[in-house]
Image: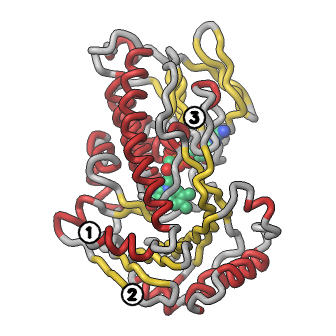
Amino acid sequence: MEQSIINTKKIAIVGGGPGGLTLARLLQLKGADVKVYERDINKDARVQGATLDLHEESGLAALQEAGLMDAFHANYRPGADKMRLVDKHAAIFFEDVFEGEEQLQRPEIDRGPLRKILLESLQQETVVWDSHLLNVQKIATGWQLNFHNGTTTADIVIAADGANSKIRPLITPLKPFFSGVTIVEGTVYNSEKSVPALHTLLNGGKIFVMGDSKTIIVSSKGDGSLVFYAGINTAEDWSKNCGVDFKNADEVRTWFKNTFADWAPIWFELFDQAEPQFVVRPQYCMPLDQCWETLPDMTMLGDAAHLMPPYAGEGVNMAMKDALELSRCLYDPSFATIQEALAGYEKQMNTRFAEIGKITLDQTASLHSEAGLENLLAMFKGE
Ligand SMILES: Cc1cc2nc3c(=O)[nH]c(=O)nc-3n(C[C@H](O)[C@H](O)[C@H](O)COP(=O)(O)OP(=O)(O)OC[C@H]3O[C@@H](n4cnc5c(N)ncnc54)[C@H](O)[C@@H]3O)c2cc1C
């Protein structure tokens, strides 16, 4: 598309996660008229989740093109890529400290600082906070977006509204399928004081705990807290039918003690000292062979487009790579129309997802199998 054409269009991105914000930045650098509609009431509305490692070919490549590598280097967490693999008794089987070049290929940054970097890179008033999208309607000139508190219109709509995208059904009838694993997630503030033994084991990095076809992944954060998620094999509707009220912290702690009964006490401390708000997350994945007829003026990226479990650490990286590819396609003069540009983006996005999604599903199953620890050990040793 010629720059002169695309820059006359009003672009609405729904969702201000890493995917939506990266896209907004990349498009603004090219002169686009872009707004991000985000349901959070303001930038401080939520505590942002765990540490992410950004990959050279995806998350970092997007930041590079966005001109944000200096800001990234001022905010990333050198050393946070330290990693220990332990069994249910907390015996260490493997530890890794990435050094030199290796560290720079997968540097870690907390989700909060990443969001801050992206937000600060945008023109004033780009993000329209408190914009909970309810639905989108086709109109003669493009799209009408209906929010809980008003409406707006746009020529092009990009869905970056995550796992439960309200826009995805307008693009494809395909739905995510259950991966077989459910996660229970929690946060411990001031881990040095609250869970000192675990804090020492964590050593400012990450711990992967494997045993009995179950997992716990613990990540340190730059603010002294840690986040963790326990993964178990379940039926799809387990979180609704298991008899545990996940809003009741005591019930969650009792569930954990029963389910991880012969695990070391250090893991019980994690649940005992966690903030009372646990989150239960059944893990879904979009079909790996997904494709659809491209619309003339609407597409999607990130979890909205290719939700998958977190066990290969690819979700944010893929969302940012999507933003990079979409911004390039929209300004690629070899595409004659916007629809062709969107089709070019979707083709390569779905091809990339078919590969990364397969790796992710295989990894999810492998970690939650009887041989989970041995499998991950072999992977870390490059066997
Ligand atoms: C426990 C866990 C651990 C993970 N760990 C990693 C990891 O280590 N590395 C990694 O790369 N990925 C990880 N992921 C995956 C990663 O979080 C997602 O893939 C990534 O956040 C997707 O980015 P996104 O921008 O597409 O969507 P999101 O980050 O989900 O952002 C969507 C945005 O849209 C907004 N929104 C949603 N609905 C509406 C609406 N109706 N109206 C307006 N706004 C709306 C939301 O408020 C949100 O801000 C993990 C996921 C989980 C659950």
Q: Which of 124 and 72 lies nearest the eye of the viewer?
A: 72
Mark 3 or mark 2: name the one nearer the start of the chain.
Answer: 3
The residue lying at 69 percent from left, 59 percent from top is 235
Q: Nearer the viewer, mark 1 or mark 3?
A: 1
Mark 1 → mark 2, Cα distance in angstroms = 19 Å
Location of residue 5 (image quadrant) = top left
Give the mark nearest the N terminus, 1 or 3: 3
Viewer can see residue 215: yes
Placement of 258 over or under 364, stated as above or below: below
| Mark 1 nearby-residue class (10 Å; few <14, some 14–19, many ≥20) | few
* Residue 171 shown left or right of residue 55 in the figure: right
Instruction: Looking at the picture, tell me which residue is in the foreground, 120 or 298.
Output: 298
- The disc at residue 71 is none
Left or right of 106: which side holds 226? Answer: right
Identify the disc placed on residue 383.
Answer: 1
Type of residue at label 2?
Answer: Ile
The verdict on label 3 being within 8 Å of ligand 1 is: yes
**Residue 41 x/y as whole percent:** 66, 47
**Disc 3 residue type?**
Val
Which residue lies at the image location 70% right of the left edge and 25% below the top edge?
A: 151
Label 3 element class: strand
In the image, which disc is placed on residue 92? 2
Residue at image mark 3 = 14
Alpha-carbon span between mark 1 and mark 3? 42 Å
Q: Nearer the viewer, mark 3 or mark 2?
A: 2
